[in-house]
Amino acid sequence: MAFNRRLVFYAWADSNDNYPFQRVPGAEALAALPTHEIVLDHGDDSLTAVEVVEVGSEREPTRLLLHALHGPGSRPSRWGPGEGAQSITIGQNQYTAFSSHVAIWNDNIAALDAHANAPGLGRLSRYFLRLARERVAFRPLFEQDAARRLEDLDGIRGVDFAIHDAYKVERARANGMISELMPRKEFPSIHVSAGMSQKDAHDDYIDDAVADELFELADNAEQFFDRIKIRGLSKTLRTKTGLKQSIVVNLLTERLHIEEALEADLENPSMPDKDEVFEALDAARRTLEADGDKLALAAEARMAIDAAD
């Protein structure tokens, strides 16, 4: 059995200049946590746990297993023909989980194996802060053309997003901004398009505060969306009639990534083999560096996007 994964790359940065992120000491602090303190409760039955696979060093990446845990209120059900849906019963201090493998390098690059239910790095940021007192922000890297369009974006006129997974729908309804855009009636699958209409002036944009919140959500898009696109206008490009040209960026599919098929863990067939995943993340990084140094270019573009904001 093979697992299809998107090996997605990020840039990490200090979220507070007065407290630079200490990757290795932070991982050592997490590794030293007693077992009864490993699970972080975010509230609303949202739980996170981190396993330190390798603390890392100046030359070697920090390797982690990031788990999104489900407590009793959000645990999935089991189903069988003629039996219907029934609650899954597991032991005390045990959880159902979706997991990601995370590598964090010393040169401000990070990566994870993304899949439909993968926990995003926003969870890891909160975990580092709460349990290791380390402050870090993870920002997705984009393919070169998408990064160029984002940097050229003069303002956002609209957003289109789709959520097909029931658990993500539940999480989205718990987020203030997304829940305001979603229909009041509950549906198992949601597609929302919101923004300026044709009646609005061509160069009118949504409020800056809303745009900032959209970008913040987009940085952790995997946690909420199955698809998210932003629409806006170019700073530099013009149509034949002289108007600013429209720009569309898919904030999920246009991220810097490599597709990989990974073999299942022999002891736990519900997950890919841990060592193979980390080897694949290392190999994906080498591939991107060899391919016209796409990784460095993407990181530079991300810095330019953040500076423009």
Image (cartoon, helix red, strand yellow):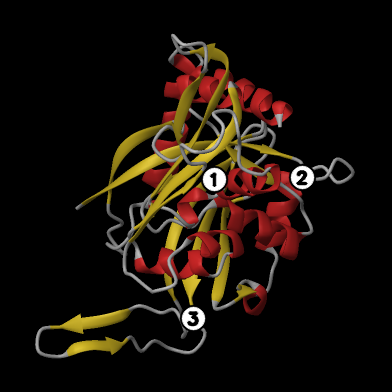
State the SS at label 3. Answer: loop
Direction from residue 74 to residue 59 in the image, left or right: right
Mark 1 neighbour density, 10 Å: few (under 14) some (14–19) many (20 or more): many
Direction from residue 14 to residue 160 in the image, left or right: left
User: Who's the residue at 39% across and 74% down the image?
Assistant: 185
The C terminus lies in quadrant: top right
Mark 2 neighbour density, 10 Å: few (under 14) some (14–19) many (20 or more): some
Rendered view: 233 above or below 16: above
**Viewer-proximal residue among 285 and 206:** 206
Residue to which mark 3 is pinned: 71
Residue to which mark 2 is pinned: 15
Sequence-wise, which precedes: disc 1 or disc 2?
Answer: 2
User: Who's the residue at 35% across and 78% down the image?
Assistant: 76
**Viewer-proximal residue among 228 and 102:** 228
Rendered view: 129 above or below 255: below
- Is label 1 or label 2 in front? 1
| Kind of residue at disc 2 | Ser
Residue to which mark 1 is pinned: 218
Q: Quadrant of residue 264?
A: bottom left
User: Who's the residue at 47% across and 26% down the image?
Assistant: 247
Q: Position of residue 192 (x, y in %)?
A: 41, 54
Q: Position of residue 48 (x, y in %)?
A: 57, 67
